[in-house]
Image (tube, grey):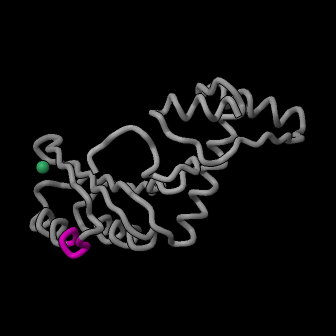
Amino acid sequence: MQESLFSGLLAGGLRPMSQLSRTGVSLEDDLLQKFDRLIGKRGYKNRSEAIRDLIREALLAETVDSNKPVVGTLTLVYDHHMPNLGEKLTALQHSAGAMILATTHVHLDHNYCLEVVIMKGRSKELQAIADHMLALRGVELGKLVLTNSGKGLKGVDPHTHSHTHSH
Ligand code: NI
């Protein structure tokens, strides 16, 4: 209880909406030792936060599998000299309309461009947009990362928290 209240306050005045429950898990010694080594390497200070993150990851995988709304970033590295490639990438983004939130472009060197496309939509729609872009000739590397849109994370309603922001 204390812990959720404090971490909520530290995170910027978020009002905790769900109560903290305690649970015990029985594990084989060697499995627990391996887990402790892993989370130590990753910099976790305690098991609880590591386990919470694993659960959030599993819930995210479920969200993605069931084609629910998510946000995504698509990172592309492409050949700047490939004819019409820039235009094709822009055209695909235009046809995706409101699902494209923002794009950042960096000219990496004489030959390559890096583009990061930030998207919002159902997971299968975002995957389809990404697949189209990644399949274009001259797109050398790319990766789509889908994540939670923030909705329902920590059980906090996005518009009940106390700090001010611009929307
Ligand atoms: Ni460029």
| Highlighted range, magenta | 92-97
Residue drawn where x is 71% and y is 41% of the image: 20
Q: Picture quarter containing residue 140?
A: bottom left
Residue drawn where x is 34% and y is 66% of the image: 130
Residue 111 image point, x, y percent? 14, 47
Q: Is residue 153 highlighted in magenta?
A: no
Residue 21 image point, x, y percent? 76, 43
Say if 43 sits above or below 83 in the image. Answer: above
Q: How many marks?
A: 0
Residue drawn where x is 50% and y is 69% of the image: 68
Q: Picture quarter containing residue 100?
A: bottom left
Question: Is 101 or 35 nearer to us in this picture?
Answer: 101
Question: Is 159 or 64 nearer to us in this picture?
Answer: 159
Quarter in which the N terminus is drawn:
top right
Say if 56 sits above or below 128 in the image. Answer: above
Question: Is 164 or 107 nearer to us in this picture?
Answer: 164
